[in-house]
Amino acid sequence: MEQVDLITEALNLTLFGMGFVFLFLTLLVFVTKLMSIIIQKIQDSTPVEAGAPHRDEMADELDEEAKFVIEQAIKMHRGA
Amino acid sequence: MEQVDLITEALNLTLFGMGFVFLFLTLLVFVTKLMSIIIQKIQDSTPVEAGAPHRDEMADELDEEAKFVIEQAIKMHRGA
Amino acid sequence: MEQVDLITEALNLTLFGMGFVFLFLTLLVFVTKLMSIIIQKIQDSTPVEAGAPHRDEMADELDEEAKFVIEQAIKMHRGA
Amino acid sequence: MEQLNMLWANTGLQQMAWGQGLMLLVGMLLLYLAIVKKFEPLLLLPIGFGSILANIPGAGIAEGNGILHIFYEVGIESGAFPLIIFMGVGALTDFGPLLANPKTLLLGAAAQFGIFATLLGAIGLSAMGIFDFSLNDAAAIGIIGGADGPTSIYVASKLAPDLLGAIAVASYSYMALVPLIQPPIMRALTTKKERQIKMVQLREVSTAEKIIFPVMLLMLVALLLPDAAPLLGMFAFGNLMKESGVVDRLSDTTQNALINIVTIFLGLAVGSKLMADKFLQPETLGILVLGMVAFAIGTACGLLMAKLMNAFGKNKINPLIGSAGVSAVPMAARVSNKVGLEADPHNFLLMHAMGPNVAGVIGSAIAAGIMIQFLG
Amino acid sequence: MEQLNMLWANTGLQQMAWGQGLMLLVGMLLLYLAIVKKFEPLLLLPIGFGSILANIPGAGIAEGNGILHIFYEVGIESGAFPLIIFMGVGALTDFGPLLANPKTLLLGAAAQFGIFATLLGAIGLSAMGIFDFSLNDAAAIGIIGGADGPTSIYVASKLAPDLLGAIAVASYSYMALVPLIQPPIMRALTTKKERQIKMVQLREVSTAEKIIFPVMLLMLVALLLPDAAPLLGMFAFGNLMKESGVVDRLSDTTQNALINIVTIFLGLAVGSKLMADKFLQPETLGILVLGMVAFAIGTACGLLMAKLMNAFGKNKINPLIGSAGVSAVPMAARVSNKVGLEADPHNFLLMHAMGPNVAGVIGSAIAAGIMIQFLG
Amino acid sequence: MEQLNMLWANTGLQQMAWGQGLMLLVGMLLLYLAIVKKFEPLLLLPIGFGSILANIPGAGIAEGNGILHIFYEVGIESGAFPLIIFMGVGALTDFGPLLANPKTLLLGAAAQFGIFATLLGAIGLSAMGIFDFSLNDAAAIGIIGGADGPTSIYVASKLAPDLLGAIAVASYSYMALVPLIQPPIMRALTTKKERQIKMVQLREVSTAEKIIFPVMLLMLVALLLPDAAPLLGMFAFGNLMKESGVVDRLSDTTQNALINIVTIFLGLAVGSKLMADKFLQPETLGILVLGMVAFAIGTACGLLMAKLMNAFGKNKINPLIGSAGVSAVPMAARVSNKVGLEADPHNFLLMHAMGPNVAGVIGSAIAAGIMIQFLG
Ligand code: NA
Ligand code: NA
Ligand code: NA
């Protein structure tokens, strides 16, 4: 009796388990495809990178100048 | 009385300790020599590497081809 | 009543806190300056590095010779 | 004289049970497989060495305050080591081929049938009275068929800690044996014509897609199967660190120092579960046999699913990439490529097989989550 | 049927509270800020991901035996992670510019007024009945103004663990926003002429001074404020490893593998404190507002202190380097340099600003020590 | 006013006991030895810094929930840190010279007499009422003569945790002093003719031998002295990872990131045992004196054993390599080479001395195992 229960439970688990695995991965297929389509649409409509130019620009400027200055400064301070 | 016991115990420990250290390392000398002799015998009798050619060969083939393909594939997929 | 206590305590903490921060860092300014002056004095009076020549010398000799020997030895033992 | 007796009484020789002696030989066999046969040496060498340490009579290294037992408690009982390894695997995974051809996810789904078939087999053997596996045991054994070491160890630590040693050893051994186990099955279930199918060149995948995918995967897991979230969460996190490109120093460390350190201690800790009294049970033999069956069934189902998909879709899939759905990354994908080249020396399947290969990792983690939800 | 119901009942969808859904969005916002806006990604990416994991309904990753909760207990409750990070920061810090011009330490002192003003503000809001912050809460919130992530986390873990998530997020977000928050304040409080002040070239600093400084700093802390000794001790230790030149292999590992590994787990563990029921409180909003205020006041006080010092000293200080006293190393120093270049394109302030910048780290740790001593 | 008083009452200055002040100076002395004199800086710098942190009055860093006490409990009380370091040492060890001339193992055995002579000395001093060492204390002190830091720390943590600080400091200090302690003894006990003995060129050793040796060593330990298995097991594991050649990424990490990380925390944790009330005892002086004696006797016995072996064997051994049997790898071997070159500038003994040098590591671990078996 008990063993029949065990087997039933195992079969149940298998059924639901494989079902869920397929459900999940099928869903993932669709969501992935959807995501790829959306991304490609967005990227086609913005041929050059848009994004957040305001802050990035500032950061970049900072980066370039600072890098130069840091290098100079390090040069001066070495030996120390 | 107690201190005599302590000294006796310390002497015992020293005796057995040094004895065991020598026993162990002497044994290790012999086992090591034996091992070296056996290894050298085996290596002399098999001038070219034997081992497990069956699987290794397969793995090697896999390796060479796969490496080429991986490189090609990576090249194609970069930029992505 | 209780809230007045809370505010009093917060004011106290602020007063003592900022006071201590300034005290500590002012002290650090003086100690740092003192340290720098002492170090510079010492370094001016010992143009060439003194230190612990006795042991260093030995270690250096060891280093040079040993390095050579190690390289030689490794060369001999490789392949093994 | 008394002390000499005590010294002798405490030697390993005097205290050794026959089982410990046998396990020392098993440990050396694992070292042999790792070093000479190069079977997944990164795991099997530490596991083999750990199992030797665990079975030294009288040393108690894998019990109580023994160092291997501490490693086990800290790293495996807590779940930390397999999850950290999975994070590292995520940081080493490229979802590009999968994103270029998402339907290969279904091959990774089909191959998980090996897991459930093995669960059924284990319960069947119990019902026949041959072994005595509980449902929890059977589920942990089944995950061997997922061909992902960390997933196996994680599930076993939750559902069947006593079997963890045997399950881990089976898992890594069969992953190493993929080049021997899979090809005969692949040749038997496909025609030469099928093996020669050329697949459409994979498209380029943008960085944005690669960054969004792990987050999307995590969200889907969060919504549908929270019990798979620790495994797939850490996996997605590792992958996001890599693909985002903004935390390269973290990603590099994850792929190198961190995963290496954890691998060493994971291996030693797993080895500590190969103590004679736990490992030398008839169940171990059952686990080894069932694990092999799991691999074979998973391989077959992946292949058959590909053939089924070809009956409906228009872009034909070479069924040989279906066997890569068991994961065992990247070995199974290389086997697909190798068997494909036998049929057509100009047909490189490797990148196509990488899709189902990483899909298999996701699929097994989902299956693991279901097991933990129903039984944990 | 029963099992289907159970599966559905256990999905995240079914179990989700509105708060958890919101927090998943907050987590994704943090990932967006980290990846796209590059806001301190080394911390905000792990924190964001951790907060997503923590809010997966039904998964319990940030509670009980969940892995993130384990990371939190092991690494943050013990104080180990922030202290190890601080050791790494020490190993990455160069005290050279500070040693060449020690009086810039006073700028680092003045900028700490942001901390205490915020404490007063938080208590004031409580007194008005708008929020309900205890003195401990207020102190932990104030430390955000110190602009040192590990110091904030360390103090919050001691004084207000419930607010740790919000405090850490505010701390790292505002550190990333330094280039936006500071320049308007800097321009408002200085004249163009002041911004054009050229400072005396910094002298060379000898190795001996650099080696002795961390030991001296530790001794001063030991004698005057033992409660700051864990933080400043580990900081000084990291710095001594670097400057001594005799343990380069330890110093290299500290600056790379070790700090990276700890950063990953610190971030995930902090993320675990962003669970909906703790984070979605009116207090969080208060913390975010007060944190911003703390930054602004600290910036202003640093500038004003520099102007005050110019009223007395003979070697004029460009007041723009005063704002670097809030720390946020090295971002704040780079902002000083940038605003300085606007006024005079040949006046490089970067190295001069590094002095108050690292002084701010010391100042905040001292303030933290005082808070812990009075309230801990 | 009240608060000012409290602040003052809590300063280190106010709370300092004379002992803590003295220990701060001892800590700085250790830093001086590490940085300026380059005495084993990899350990003495963290130990020295740890001892300063541990003795900051009122900070409690080495007690209760203090971070150094946590490091101690997690890493040293558990045995993990010294064992991991030993694994790293194994991964850095080349048994080639030993395998080419196995009888030099006996030199490594003889040099262990320093350990037991010191044990007798410590007990003798106790019997005379000068100190009050138990047998456990005496055994832990004796291991200093083994000249292996991790072995000393491991044994002390098992047998005499209260003396651990002093033992570790003595151990590493004397290892650094090997070039000063050994040469006079070496010259006194050998004739110039003996020092000029040229040894037979070492043969090449095959990879197979190098791979089998650590496994064989472990098996012998397993069978004969299980209590030495943790130490020698981890040592052999590290060596096997290196020599097997199949897990290079694990071996590299073990030799670099892992050993470095653990060294830092081991050092700090050992430093925490240098708290004034434990360290400033007459026993510490006894330990320092006895440790020196242990080194001297070990050196002498190694030399004398070589002379004894020359009385019987036909391939003469240069007795100078006997002193390398105390281990202190590779310093002692370099000293042998150096003193040998004084007698004959063309006689390079370095590789010959590496045999007894690594034999000394094994010998000390065996001696440690015996101590733990009889007293642990
Ligand atoms: Na799988
Ligand atoms: Na600061
Ligand atoms: Na030794």
Image: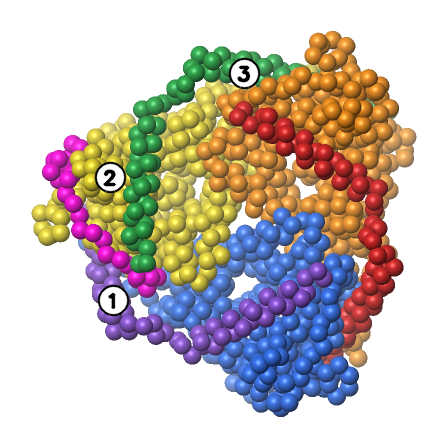
Chain colours: A purple, B green, C red, D yellow, E blue, F orange
The percent coordinates of residue E141 (x first, y second) are: 57, 75
SS category of the residue bearing label 3: helix
Residue F234: mark in rendering: none
SS category of the residue bearing label 2: helix
Task: Write down the region rendered in magenta.
Answer: D187-211
The percent coordinates of residue E30 (x first, y second) are: 42, 69
**What chain is tagged by disc 3?**
B
Same chain check for tags 3 and 1: no
| Residue E127 in sight in this render | no
Residue matched to label 1: A40
Residue B35: mark in rendering: 3
SS category of the residue bearing label 1: helix
Question: Which quadrant of the structure image shows residue F295?
Answer: top right
Q: What's under tag 3, amino acid-wise? A: Met
| Residue D257 in sight in this render | yes
Residue at the image point whose x is 68% and y is 35% from the top: C67
The percent coordinates of residue E175 (x first, y second) are: 53, 73
Residue matched to label 2: D336
Residue at the image point whose x is 71% and y is 54% from the top: E244
Q: What's under tag 2, amino acid-wise? A: Ser
**What chain is tagged by disc 2?**
D
* Count of numbered circles on the image: 3
Question: CA–CA distance between discs 2 and 3?
Answer: 42 Å
Residue D220 drawn above or below residue F245: below
**What chain is tagged by disc 1?**
A
Same chain check for tags 2 and 3: no
- In-front residue for pair B80/F261: B80
